[in-house]
Image: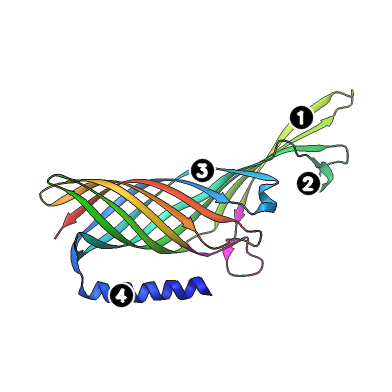
Amino acid sequence: MKNRVVFLAILSLVSLNAVYAQLSGVGFRPMATFSTYKLSKDLNDIHDSYLRLGGGGALFAEFNLGSRFTFQPEIVYVQRGANLKSESRLSWNGQHFGYPRDYQVKEIRRQETLHYLDIPLMFEKNFGGGGLGAYVAFGPAISIAVANGFGREEIDVVHLDLEGKQSAFTDRKEYTIEMGRGRYDDYRKGDLSVNLGAGIVLILDSGEIGLDVRYTHGLRNIDISGIKNRTLSVGLSYMYYF
């Protein structure tokens, strides 16, 4: 509830500023994403979370606030998710996974991809001059899942064959991650985040080309076990000046 009140206050402030601000340009930004999950303590004792490569793209507008400050609202499609791997010190009785009693599950690997539409509200401080500039940025964002997620699971299993020798195989399956608000959905559809950004820009006669780096820090648990989104993105942007 506290987070929602803060976000509503920020949105109200942004709306007032936008009325008096001057639109200076519009642009787009294709990007690569490197995402992972922040796991709860219980999950972290069982799994490790690693970066997963994805992609996305943004449309944005820039408003001049004066004193080299700008306000940049965006609409962003972004892929999130993670690569998950069970701790190497752990193993499980195969019966828990539908295998015979004498089977052992030695490792579990999952690759998950989530699809979000983000609305970041970024405040930027600009530096430099002439043909080269730079900026730092900060702002909140609201995220909504635009589709169910996709997952791929691999399970390594060992057992003794008829000759008493150890045998191993890997089971693979794909699964859908249900995104929604219901009690039976896998992950929550909505998220809130804080965004930090920085970049360098090459200033042209009618616009600018920029190299942008953005970190998105998810604030909400997206499932009941305590998973949070973490995303680093690198993009190449172009903005047309008005």
Asked which secondary structure carries label 4, the reply is helix
First of labels 3, 4 by sequence position: 4
Q: Is residue 24 above or below residue 105?
A: below
Q: CA distance from mark 2 to mark 4?
A: 52 Å
Amino acid type at circle 4 is Ser
Residue 97's tag is: 2
Q: Which residue is mark 4?
A: 15
Give the left or right position of residue 130, taking residue 115 as reference: left
Q: Which residue is mark 1?
A: 168
Identify the residue at image location x=42%, y=75%. Answer: 8
Amino acid type at circle 2 is Phe
Circles 1 and 3, Cβ within 8 Å, touching? The answer is no
Query: Where is residue 212 drawn, in percent x and y?
Result: 31, 47
Q: CA distance from mark 3 to mark 2?
A: 26 Å
Mark toward the viewer: 1 or 3: 3
Circles 2 and 1, Cβ within 8 Å, touching? The answer is no
Query: Where is residue 131 drawn, in percent x and y?
Result: 14, 44
First of labels 2, 4 by sequence position: 4
Query: Where is residue 168 drawn, in percent x and y?
Result: 76, 29
Q: Which residue is mark 3?
A: 52
Amino acid type at circle 3 is Arg
Q: Which residues are magenta?
A: 176-192
Residue 67's tag is: none
Mark toward the viewer: 2 or 4: 4
Asked which secondary structure carries label 3, the reply is strand
Magenta residue check for 191 = yes
Give the left or right position of residue 36, taking residue 132 as reference: right
Q: CA distance from mark 2 to mark 1?
A: 15 Å
